Image (cartoon, helix red, strand yellow):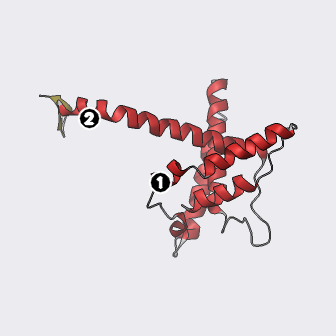
């Protein structure tokens, strides 16, 4: 919930400078349409409050562990042999990193005196990640009836997996 609110606030107020004023206005309009889309807002009537993750004694430690693990994942992406896979993986990892940057900010600010700042490539990666995640959710929604139909003919057996009846 807070991630969506902070990201929405930031994305709406961000300056989009493509060098073409008409395209800049179009981009800003499209971002507003995305951020304030009623379908998106109604899709999650009881959103998760991410701020509760950082409360309590273990909150700061949990945040540091997540950041450390994320850095490890980012470093692993450099080892991917396929250039295309590495490029798309790094783009998605940067999108996740941007989401974490927003999430770890306090009330949308990195520090009390300095507002959250995202670089152009972070915004691009974040929007790309949102697109990829929405495509995945759409795929699952479309495939769920077929999966349910398939599972009707299967019976789970703990020792050996699924068994056809």
Cα distance between the residues tagged 2 and 1: 25 Å
Which residue is at the front of the view, 151 or 156?
A: 151
Find residue 87 and report its image quarter. Answer: top right
Expressed as whole percent of the image width and height from the top left, the position of residue 44 reads 46, 55
| Left or right of 55, for residue 110 | right
Q: Name which residue lies at 79% across and 67% down.
A: 114
Outermost right residue: 19
Q: Image height check: is 98 above or below 78?
A: below
The answer to whether any part of residue 71 appears in the image is: no
Q: How crowded is mark 2: few (under 14 residues within 10 Å), some or many (20 or more)?
A: few
Expressed as whole percent of the image width and height from the top left, the position of residue 58 reads 52, 71
The answer to whether any part of residue 96 appears in the image is: yes
Which residue is at the front of the view, 23 or 94?
A: 23
| The label number, if any, that marks residue 42 in the structure image | 1
Find residue 81 and report its image quarter. Answer: top right
| The label number, if any, that marks residue 142 in the structure image | none
Q: Residues within 10 Å of mark 1 (few under 14, many from 20)?
A: few
Circles 2 and 1: CB atoms closer than 8 Å: no
Q: What element carries label 1?
A: helix
| Left or right of 74, for residue 110 | right
Q: Is mark 2 on a helix, strand or loop?
A: helix
Report the quarter where the C terminus lies: top left
Q: Name which residue lies at 60% across and 52% down.
A: 36
Outermost bottom residue: 57
Expressed as whole percent of the image width and height from the top left, the position of residue 151 reads 23, 33
Expressed as whole percent of the image width and height from the top left, the position of residue 118 reads 75, 52
Q: Name which residue lies at 66% across and 37% down.
A: 91
Q: Mark 2 points at which residue?
A: 148
Outermost left residue: 165
Q: Image height check: is 76 above or below 63?
A: above
| Left or right of 18, for residue 107 | left
């Amino acid at each position: 919930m807070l991630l969506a609110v902070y990201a929405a606030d930031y994305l709406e107020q961000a300056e989009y400078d493509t060098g073409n004023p008409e395209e800049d206005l179009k981009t800003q309009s499209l971002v507003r349409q995305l951020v304030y889309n009623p379908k998106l807002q109604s899709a999650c009537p009881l959103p998760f409050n991410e701020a509760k993750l950082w409360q309590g004694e273990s909150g700061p430690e949990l945040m540091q562990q997540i950041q450390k693990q994320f850095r490890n994942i980012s470093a692993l992406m450099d080892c991917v042999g396929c250039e295309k896979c590495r490029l798309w993986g790094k783009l998605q990892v940067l999108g996740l990193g941007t989401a974490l940057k927003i999430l770890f900010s306090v009330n949308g600010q990195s520090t009390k005196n300095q507002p959250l700042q995202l670089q152009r490539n972070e915004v691009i990666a974040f929007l790309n990640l949102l697109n990829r995640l929405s495509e995945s959710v759409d795929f699952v929604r479309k495939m769920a009836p077929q999966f349910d139909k398939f599972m009707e003919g299967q019976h789970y057996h703990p020792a050996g997996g699924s068994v056809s009846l």
